[in-house]
Every structure is written in C-alpha cells, then in structure tokens.
Image: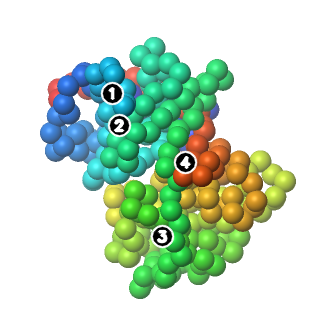
Amino acid sequence: MKIRIVDAFTDRPFTGNPAGVVILDSGPYPEADRLQRIASEVNLPETAFAHPLPPGGEADWALRWFTPTTEVDLCGHATLATAHVLHTTGVASGTVRHATRSGVLRTTAHEDGSLTLDFPTAPLTPATAPPGLVEALGASPLSLHDTGKHVDDFLVELADETAVRALKPDFAALASCSRRGVIATAAAEDPAGPYDFVSRGFFPRVGIDEDPVTGSAHTALAPFWSARLGRDDLIGLQASARSGLVRTSLRGERTLLTGSAVTVIDGELLAGL
C-alpha cells in the first residue's frame, strides 16, 4: 500500500504543512481504528485516506482525515495534498469531487501545478471568550467569533501582526477551553506587501499544538477579512515556523482556497490494512 508525504500550501519542500496521503482500493474503508493507528504512526498534523467511488454518483472519491489522535470533519491541507497525489500520479485530471463528512468538496488542478479547493464558507458568529481562553492564549482579543460546526474553532482577532507572531500559548490550558482549536489573526503589517492578513492556528485538543498551515481555517478567515478589507480575493500568510500562503476567494456560501504542493516522500506501508 503506497503512502506519500506531501507538503501543502507551498512550492518548496520542507515548508508548508505536511500531510500523509494513503490511496486505497475501491470498496469500503477499513475500520476507523485501523485508520487512526496509521495516522498516529505517521504522526503528521493530518493523514488523508481516499478511495475511488463507482462512476455515476455525486462524487468521484471518498476522503477522510485523521490527526494523530482523532478523525476530523474538515481539513484543507490534506485535501490539497490528496488532490496533488491524484493529479501527479495520473489517476485524476481537471476537477475531482470528494465525498467527505463536510459534504462534497471539489478540487481543481491548474496548468501551473496549483490546485483550488472549493469548500463551504464558515459561518461567523460573534462570541464571548470562554473562561481561561484569554489567559491560555496570552493575548487580549479585539474580537472573537465562533466558526460553526465543521471548522469548530474560535477566530480571535488581535491588535496587529506583531501580536500574532509573538504568541506563546499555554497548550495544556488551551486544550481545556477550546473545541477543535483557536485561530489567531491580524491584518498584515504592510498593506502593500505580499499578503493581506496573517494567522496562526493552535489545536492541542486534537493532538496538534500549532498547525503549520490550516486550510479549513481560511474558510473563516476569508469572510472575516473580506468584510474588513472590502475585497473578495485575498492572500493569507500562516506565520508558523514552516509558513505557507493561501489564496482565498470568497464566493458567498463557498470559499475557494488555492495553493501548491510538493511530494517529499513516496513509500510503502508494509503493515497492511
């Protein structure tokens, strides 16, 4: 069984967000416990498992995502990584429809090698910080929003880019006062620079203290910053140690996320499924 490690939302190896990608044969998935064990062994922010579906249905491939500790409803970077593998290995071309826990998601490959994800826009609702969140994050928010059931994070706006970059959360405390996690964000320090906003994503409750580049978070960041900046097409920088850029295009109830990916390891899973 082939397993690949793909760096997503980057065009350079060893940057962006790494994901494991396992392409399965057609038929039902193995037991979730087996998939979880493989994801724990891979020990990356996410491992994606995909298998082809019969022709004629609403989707072409089934897709699931697992962190080292749990299955999640939505993952952008592992979807991008999976689409990259399908296209670079010649299994798919053009637009691919993926059946997921968040509905049918589409990925489209472009001639320059980049890929666009068509995801549901996260509904943003103003919220009050739960007890302990501000202390665990180590910064006071300008605003705080709930991002809805599929993303399931708190979106925390901070004063400026410097404040986002300087965060040093208490991850154990943060895990006890968040759901999936916390997205911290601010406008770019230089409005004329190569990106429009910055973010960092912390998800200790699902086994990821800091995620390098979180595609799903940008389905909330896109409407948040589009409303403030007055533009539907933006570029976000996730300011983690590995870093990565996500181009966002707000299209009402859908958000398009565009980025590149690089396969860095192509191997074989010896302990069969």
Q: Nearer the viewer, mark 4 or mark 1?
A: 1
Quadrant including the N terminus: top left
CB within 8 Å, label 1 to label 2: yes
Q: Is mark 1 on a helix, strand or loop?
A: loop
* Above or below 40: residue 156: below
Residue at left offset 35%, top offset 37%: 99
Image vertical order of residue 218 relative to residue 110, above or below? below
Instruction: Place residue 180 in its image quadrant.
Output: bottom left
Of the numbered discs 4 and 1, the one sitting upstream in the chain is 1
Front-lying residue, 192 or 14: 192
Do callouts 4 and 1 mark residues in contact (Cβ within 8 Å)?
Answer: no
Amino acid on which disc 2 is placed = Ala
* Three-letter residue code for mark 3: Asp
Mark 4 to mark 1: distance in Å? 21 Å
Identify the element where label 4 is drawn. strand
Circle number at residue 57: 1
Q: Look at the numbered discs 3 and 1 and tell me whether their residues touch, using CB distance below 8 Å.
A: no
The amino acid at mark 4 is: Arg
Residue pointed to by mark 3: 146
Which of label 3 and label 1 is nearer to you?
Answer: 1
Work out how far the residue at label 3 is from the one at label 1, CA to CA, in angstroms.
34 Å
Structural distance between the alpha carbons of marks 1 and 2: 10 Å
Crowding at dot 1, Cα within 10 Å, few <14 / some 14-19 / many 20+, comes out as: few
Figure colour scheme: rainbow
Mark 2 is surrounded, within 10 Å at the Cα level, by few (under 14), some (14 to 19) or many (20 or more) other residues, namely many
Give the distance between the C-alpha atoms of the residues marked 2 and 3, in whole angstroms: 25 Å
Which residue bears the numbered disc 4?
254
Please, what secondary structure does the residue beneath circle 3 have? Answer: strand
Q: Position of residue 200 (x, y in %)?
A: 56, 60
Query: Residue 246: where, in percent of width, then height?
Result: 62, 45
Q: Which residue does the image show at 22% across and 39% down from the upper left?
A: 35
